[in-house]
Amino acid sequence: MSLVDQLAAVVGAEHATADVPAAYLSDATESRAMRGDASALVRPGSAEEVAAVVACCYERGAAMVPRGGGSGFAGGAVPLDGAVVVSLERLDRIRSLEPGLWRMEAEAGVTTATVRRRARESGLLYPVDPGAAEQSHIGGNVACNAGGPHAFKYGVTGAWVTGLEAVLAPGELVRSGGAVRKDVAGYDWARLLIGSEGTLGMVTAVHLRLVPAPETARPVAAVYADAESGCAVIAGVLAAGIEPATLEYLDGATLAAAGASFPAALTEAAGFMVIAEADGSVAEAARVADELREVLSVGALAVHEPEGRGEIEALWRWRSGVSIAVTALHGGKASEDIAVPVEHLGEAIRATLEIGARHGLETCSWGHAGDGNLHSTFMLDASDPAALERAEAAASELFDMALRLGGTVSGEHGVGLVKRAALAKQLAPAELRIAHAIKDAFDPKGLFNPSKKLP
Amino acid sequence: MSLVDQLAAVVGAEHATADVPAAYLSDATESRAMRGDASALVRPGSAEEVAAVVACCYERGAAMVPRGGGSGFAGGAVPLDGAVVVSLERLDRIRSLEPGLWRMEAEAGVTTATVRRRARESGLLYPVDPGAAEQSHIGGNVACNAGGPHAFKYGVTGAWVTGLEAVLAPGELVRSGGAVRKDVAGYDWARLLIGSEGTLGMVTAVHLRLVPAPETARPVAAVYADAESGCAVIAGVLAAGIEPATLEYLDGATLAAAGASFPAALTEAAGFMVIAEADGSVAEAARVADELREVLSVGALAVHEPEGRGEIEALWRWRSGVSIAVTALHGGKASEDIAVPVEHLGEAIRATLEIGARHGLETCSWGHAGDGNLHSTFMLDASDPAALERAEAAASELFDMALRLGGTVSGEHGVGLVKRAALAKQLAPAELRIAHAIKDAFDPKGLFNPSKKLP
């Protein structure tokens, strides 16, 4: 029996095919012309079916690529060398939502937006807000340990996971943790799966803790003539001991690409923007917003404070759309999510521009300033091989720069395909040995998302 | 050359001895008569010396037990079978404290109290507050992933670690992360070391993130006639969507043992106490304290709200002393830190008493109610072997009960020696296989704290 026939016997003929639709061959790295090839697509309908699919592939020695919403920027979901794409889109149930106990259990294929909306409808907050919330899945968020603007105050995905259900080699459904909020029994192998990009196993469901939703949020956006003034203000927020929920920045080139749709007047002289948001009770958010306004006003050309839910949502909708606006400029982009200690943010922003200029690339950056996390971006035509090649060379210099500043080649997107060489520069030999030993322990045949994550 | 001579050559003769002082042979499990034996004590003075010590032991096949403050409740620091005790007490430097950047790098031997005090002196908060803060070391906190009352709002130790320096087999000093706040490059092996109780390597220094200290804290303590009334109030706090910094409980038997020193009048009818603390700006803490008071007053016999720093510190000092007061009653205790989903807290408290009664043991419990984390405690005379034996049998039933309720055998103390058999019941076969594979990957000779943590 062929592999596809065998998979069809597990999931039903309508959910297994050797004729893999194009949509399953790429992720957000399509903007830099990455596209894979797959021998089959299988869409299991339950965790048990995922286990059976993995067992089948593992026995036959077939490589597997787990797929969430396909919004990743590192090529983690791009199938290589005829691997089997295991799409988790049908695992889309919220298994439980217990508002009075501040928790939810969601299957891997539930979108991030659904997790957030369902929590919010119960008066609770799931605070992690990576981009593409309507597209990305909570399972993918866990696989990448996704961040986003509100990670500054609330932490990244892993901070909210109290339990995991996953299929491990050679096809076993295993659970770790659950509704209990604290657990130090055993090694925390489930935490190792968080951020492992599907290379150690396939996450099928997650237990999430939630918190009471803040009554309100009060963003303050300020524009500056240049990055120096803006970075001084970012340092000023920290030095003043103010803790906003977000501390974002956008540089001048980003504003040039995306500023037209900014929901307020934007002066032509705007060379940098900082968005800091206060949240909490109405009184607390107002107090923190007052403090933020005072610090952000220093050297600002203008300060924009949206009022009311509609205006506030418009600001964040604009912020979420920045990546798309930047891509639209030339039809493509290569964007790398380096992170550095926050005191080096200004230097990293400046160096990003210098590197791009040296390679003849239009360049911009924006990101999560408080976490020192840049989205250093080269805007290009994805059908221009020479530009793509220059972008690869430039990205390599970006990674060197981040490491020189004591940072990392990936703050939140993961390694996937695109940062494997860079990772080799970041890890010490002992770390590399450990990484390979961990991979071997979880995946002795090397069939879980091969050629990803590891150098 | 003997091992001790070889170690003396590394650390100096005054810091290596075969004549191991008694203080290095036990930890807090001395209250249940646990004591080990060691062939040598070595006290390296730097991370490099730790690496040299490990290299020396690893080459000779000598088992090592890393030792912090020795305040653990699971026997993790008790040396067995003539192991070498590697005390990290001389690694007591705060390598850096950067108030404007909200971070600190501390060596493993810095006490938890020092970390907290130094942060506070800079207007910052290191919020994790396990007991015995003057004795326990930050390295031990990391090794056990320690919790404490404020973990309810702020999370456990691991939530604050952004980087680790550790000595791994066969004696290599390795660093992961650092000052950067977000990093998803590579597998998060450092996170695996957090909570590994020294069985995978020895942590020599940690990078901690900090937050601006809340302006004030406002605890509300309320007493009830019984656990039912108290647990209803705990559920009520969650259902009302109030997020206190702590949500603690103490049962009637605990109050009977420790209540005499409670810093306010305590009615004889007090059968249960809840301590919830609001923190934040003065206004915010007052607002949350008002909400807490309203919920906690339902069915309360009395409500105590300490005013001013002195009274508030007195309340928490009393709370910290509960463990000692309970031990003092009969000279010893066996205390197990099971955790259950919070809706089962009342049942776990009741079952704890039933199990103790069945085994003829005086029994009490207190703990971190919001996290469903009990300190289920059998008070006994540690020189009475029959009582110790009954306590072991009772503890085994406690663990079964926690697992039946969907909980864990250890919420914050770790497995150490005392919960190895219990852990075997908690982990699925696949989890056990993974645990052993991880151990083998990090410690192929099995010399890091052998006979601990794993079943």
Image (spheres, coloured by chain):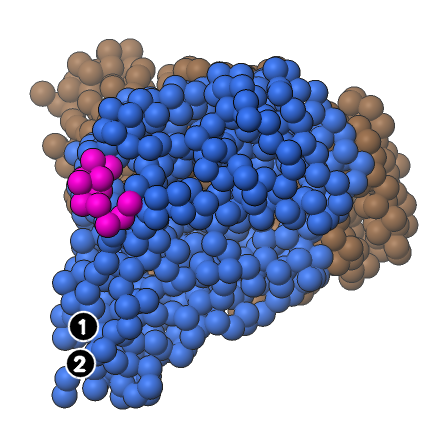
Chain colours: A brown, B blue
The boundaries of the magenta stretch are B381-392
- Disc 2: which residue: B3
Residue B26: x %, y % from top left: 29, 60
Which residue is nearer to you in this view: B439 or A89?
Answer: B439
Q: Quadrant of the N terminus of chain B?
A: bottom left
Residue at the far left in the pictured view: A1
From the image, give the main secondary structure of the stretch colored magenta. Answer: helix
One can see residue B30 in this view: yes
Q: Residue at x 18, y 53 (%)?
A: B451
Which residue is nearer to you in this view: A241 or A411?
Answer: A241
Residue B388: say if magenta: yes
Q: Is residue A372 above or below residue A381?
A: below
Q: How many marks?
A: 2
Amino acid type of the residue that numbered disc 1 sits on in the rendered structure: Ser
One can see residue A36 in this view: no
Residue B175: x %, y % from top left: 41, 65
Q: Is residue B236 above or below residue B45?
A: above
Q: Is residue A154 above or below residue B163?
A: above
- Disc 1: which residue: B39
Q: Which image quadrant for residue A248?
A: top right
Label 1 crowd (10 A; few <14 / some 14-19 / many >=20)? many
Q: Nearer the viewer, mark 1 or mark 2?
A: 1
Q: Which image quadrant for residue B12?
A: bottom left
N-terminal-most mark, 1 or 2 = 2
Residue A327: say if magenta: no
Q: Residue at x 69, y 61 (%)?
A: B122
